[in-house]
Amino acid sequence: MWKDIRIRRSYSGKEKRSEAFTKERLEFTIDPKMTEALKRISKHHQVTLNNVIQTAWGILLQKNTNLDDVVFGSVVSGRNAEVEGIEEMVGLFINTVPVRVKQEVNHTFIDVVKQMQKDSLESARYDYYPLADIQSLSEVKRNLVNHIIVFQNYYVDHELMSFDHSLGFELENITYYEENNYELAAMVIPSDTLTVRFSYNSNAYDQEMVNRLKNHFIEIIQSVIQN
């Protein structure tokens, strides 16, 4: 029997931490009715739920920065089909790539989501390209991305708990945690109820600010559903 299994996933990036880094976490859920409404919106407009969430996050950044053009990091698998022999390679290829959300005059939320999906499809072939190299090509360099959002579509705990017991051993006490170099990271876990986890450096973002981000994010989702 294997006990106390710990799964560690690290999201790379060149963001420099503050001298003092105290990690805190805030977790909340989007209730089942709202989650189902978001899924209906994505299905009706033929976009992914991930694109809907990322657009809502982009609007959150726009409202909080008073800008109509924002960038954040998105964690991708990095397993590009165009890389020769990728299907035979073992290991994690996850990478962080910049996502841009730009609001044009008279654009609706769905207009922005569809543009996001188009940009995502076009940039997918570069998902393995190092973020540091991408940032070096931008005018703002390492300041291009200062936080990340992860749409977790792989159910690690479920997969491990349904492990094939006929092999003669069992798994117990599974712990799953993530590490990253950013002072703010948001993870979205889809299910019947969306779970959102904010992982942040409390020396850079106080609890009151992170709570405001949570409330604003929920308000934006509510607005999208209502209109």
Image (tube, helix red, strand yellow):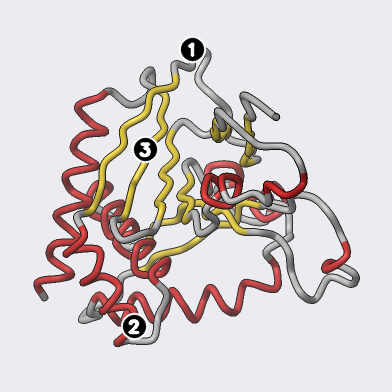
Q: Residue at x 48, y 46 (%)?
A: 148
Reading the image, the residue beneath label 1 is 20
Could you tell me which quadrant the N terminus lies in?
top right
Question: What secondary structure is marked by label 2?
Answer: helix
Q: Quadrant of residue 212?
A: top left
Q: Amino acid at mark 3?
A: Phe
Q: Camera-side residue: 224 or 37?
A: 37
Q: CB under 8 Å between callouts 3 and 1? A: no
Reading the image, the residue beneath label 2 is 43
Disc 2 crowd rating (10 Å Cα; few below 14, some 14-19, many 20+) is few
Disc 3 crowd rating (10 Å Cα; few below 14, some 14-19, many 20+) is some
Q: Amino acid at mark 1?
A: Ala
Indicate whether 21 appears above or below 89: above
Q: Residue at x 16, y 44 (%)?
A: 215
Could you tell me which quadrant the C terminus lies in?
bottom left
Task: Indicate which label's residue lies in the foreground, 3 or 1.
Answer: 3
Q: Position of residue 223 (x, y in %)?
A: 12, 65
Disc 1 crowd rating (10 Å Cα; few below 14, some 14-19, many 20+) is few
Q: Amino acid at mark 2?
A: Lys
Q: Position of residue 210 (x, y in %)?
A: 26, 33
**Mark 3 or mark 2: whose residue is earlier in sequence:** 2
Q: CA distance from mark 1 to mark 2?
A: 44 Å
Q: Position of residue 12 (x, y in %)?
A: 65, 40
Q: Is residue 96 left or right of residue 106?
A: right
Q: CA distance from mark 3 to mark 2?
A: 27 Å
Q: CB under 8 Å between callouts 3 and 2? A: no
Question: What secondary structure is marked by label 1?
Answer: loop
Reading the image, the residue beneath label 3 is 198
Q: Camera-side residue: 149 or 5?
A: 5
Work out which residue is located at the far left of the displayed protein and give it: 226
Q: Residue at x 19, y 52 (%)?
A: 218
Question: What secondary structure is marked by label 3?
Answer: strand
